[in-house]
Every structure is written in C-alpha cells, then in structure tokens.
Image (cartoon, rainbow, N blue to C red):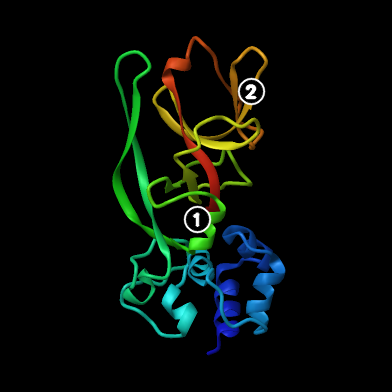
Amino acid sequence: MSLKERLKESRRNAKKTQAEIAEAVGITQPAYQALESGKNQKSSYLPMIANVLGVDPLWLTTGNSSDSFELSEVLEPVIAADELKNQFIWIDVVEANFSCGTGESIEFHFDAINGKIPFPPSFMKERNVTEQTMKIIKAKGDSMADFIKDGDMVGINLAQTDVIDGEIYAVYLAGEGMIKQIFKEADGSLILHSLNEKYRDKIVSEENGKNFKVIGRQIWRAG
C-alpha cells in the first residue's frame, strides 16, 4: 500500500476532511492534498498527521508496523519508536495539578505524563517553543466548541503568560483549570470567554484576581 493509499484509508476511517487534517497540523490544504494525491511522497508532518488520524506514525510514514504504537480510531499520545526519535521533538501530554499557597501564590505542576506527540523542529521554531516551554493537555467539556472540543489535544506555550487581547489561554481560576478566550477591559479586569454560547463569561477582577493564574497560550490543537 502506497503512502497516498494509507493516507486516504486512514482519513476515511477517521471521518475527517483534508481541510480538517491540514488545519490540525498547521499546513495548507493543498500541501496535504499533494500527499494524498501522490504528488509529494515525503513530509516532516507525517507523524503529526498520523496522530490526528489515530494511526501508527511509523506505518503511515513507511508502511511498516511498529510494536511501539497502538492503532486506534481516536487521537492518542504515542511512545517514540527508535526510527523516529531523533527526527522529531516529542512533547509531553500532561495533566496539570494546582496548589495554592498564601496570598497570590498559585503554582501548577504536571504529576502525570500520559504520552508524547511528535513535532518537526520547524514547527517548534515557527512558534518559538521548546520541549520545556510546550506541553499538551487534554480539553474537558464543550465550553470552547466548536473550535476546541471535549477530548481534543491542546498545545500550550508556558512561556506566553502575558495576555494578548482575544487570544486563547489555559488558565486557573478559583480552584478550576480551564481553556478560555481572554479579553481585556478598560478597568483592568479580564473577561474569560467561552465560544459555546450556552456558557456565561467569567470575570477576573481585582477582587478575585488572587485566585487567577495564566498557565500558557494555546498554540496548537488536534482532535
């Protein structure tokens, strides 16, 4: 089975469009179409495409199977195979936990690492992130649907904690970790906005700001 045939079969099984795959990995639809049509036989994005499609990255890239991967119909983190380890940067899929001290002391740490997802060095360079500053978390709930759905993988830049108006961040507020679009108000308060209209906005003011912390800016998603 050729690369284009593996791509077509995997995409159909995943019930995704070419545009959805391209958007998830950060390439153009024509660039993905060139792979699926056979015009292009190579791409550094193939392991990322494999993760979005829920298939073995080694199988998708070479046609050979690897015991290091589990085939699945959903996106799952994978364990790096020796054949791919040195070609990509493998980012941890983590669970964030929070601890609150006195005053404004809010700390978060990652107790559980649930796997890794491969990214080409060009992706990391374009977004100015490293293995240390990028982490991947799993979205919970539908408050940011349809942009981020329940169970989607979301890449965050831990070094980008200064709020840019209108951008999406992973944040902590009053005992809860969440992903929200943030808007700045003239009085200095922040609006935590949900894209799903059934959820009300949350306001971060001087009064409750001691219970608020920005974890990092959203820079990638897949699901």
Q: Residue beneath label 2, please? A: 184
- Disc 1 residue crowd, few under 14, some 14–19, many 20+, Cα 10 Å: some
Distance from disc 1 to disc 2, alpha carbons, whole Å, reads 28 Å
Q: Of discs 1 and 2, which sits in the foreground?
A: 1
The secondary structure type at the circle numbered 1 is helix
Q: Residue beneath label 1, please? A: 124
Residue 29 lies in quadrant: bottom right
Any part of residue 51 in sight: yes
Residue 30 lies in quadrant: bottom right
Q: Residue at x 30, y 14 (%)?
A: 102
Q: Position of residue 31 (x, y in %)?
A: 67, 71
Residue sticking out furthest to the top = 207
> What amino acid type is highlighted by mark number 1?
Met
- Disc 2 residue crowd, few under 14, some 14–19, many 20+, Cα 10 Å: some
Q: Position of residue 35 (x, y in %)?
A: 63, 78
Q: Residue at x 38, y 17 (%)?
A: 104
